Image: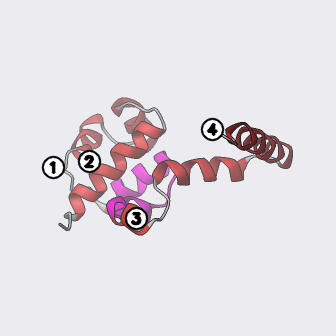
Amino acid sequence: MKKNLNTVVSENISALKGLRELDTVQLGKRASVSQKTVWNALQPETCNPTVRVLESLASALGVPPAMLLIDRSIEKASGLPDIAMLDALERFCRLDPVGQKQVAEFIALWERSQVGK
């Protein structure tokens, strides 16, 4: 069943808010919008943000505005990475080369520890 856009936007804002470990007040401050505006955006029944609010919330969450409009259930069904994976990849890409090497070494070490389990 296809979700309406208000539900998609609301679910994406909520998921990213959780990933960023932000409460409603913090997200509102980062986005320069009221706590009520954030609360409304988090409720599928009342989620109907203006383009300006959508841009502000996306910026505060560290994603392009279009990312708030993508139905993640479709991504999951198609095998595309979910928000948490995209967030992890984005953080990895922001690391300097030394940090990226350390993460790669950790992953290799972890994979070796999983052999035979």
Evaluate if marks 2 and 1 touch, with contact meaning CB atoms under 8 Å apart. Answer: yes
Of the two numbered discs 2 and 4 in the rendering, the one whose residue sits closer to the viewer: 4
SS type, badge 2: helix
The amino acid beneath tag 2 is Ala
Asked if the magenta segment contains residue 61, the reply would be: yes
Evaluate if marks 3 and 1 touch, with contact meaning CB atoms under 8 Å apart. Answer: no
- Say which residue label 4 marks: 117
User: Which callout, 4 or 1, points at the residue further toward the start of the chain?
Assistant: 1
- Say which residue label 1 marks: 46
Alpha carbon distance from label 3 to label 2: 22 Å
- Counting from the top left corner in percent of width and height, residue 111 is at 71, 44
Alpha carbon distance from label 3 to label 4: 30 Å
The amino acid beneath tag 3 is Glu
The amino acid beneath tag 1 is Thr
Alpha carbon distance from label 4 to label 1: 48 Å
Q: Quadrant of residue 68?
A: bottom left
Q: Is residue 41 left or right of residue 85?
A: left
Q: Which residues are magenta?
A: 52-73
Alpha carbon distance from label 3 to label 1: 24 Å
Alpha carbon distance from label 2 to label 4: 44 Å
Residue visible at 46% across and 55% down in the picture: 82
- Say which residue label 2 marks: 41
- Say which residue label 3 marks: 75
User: Which callout, 2 or 4, points at the residue further toward the start of the chain?
Assistant: 2
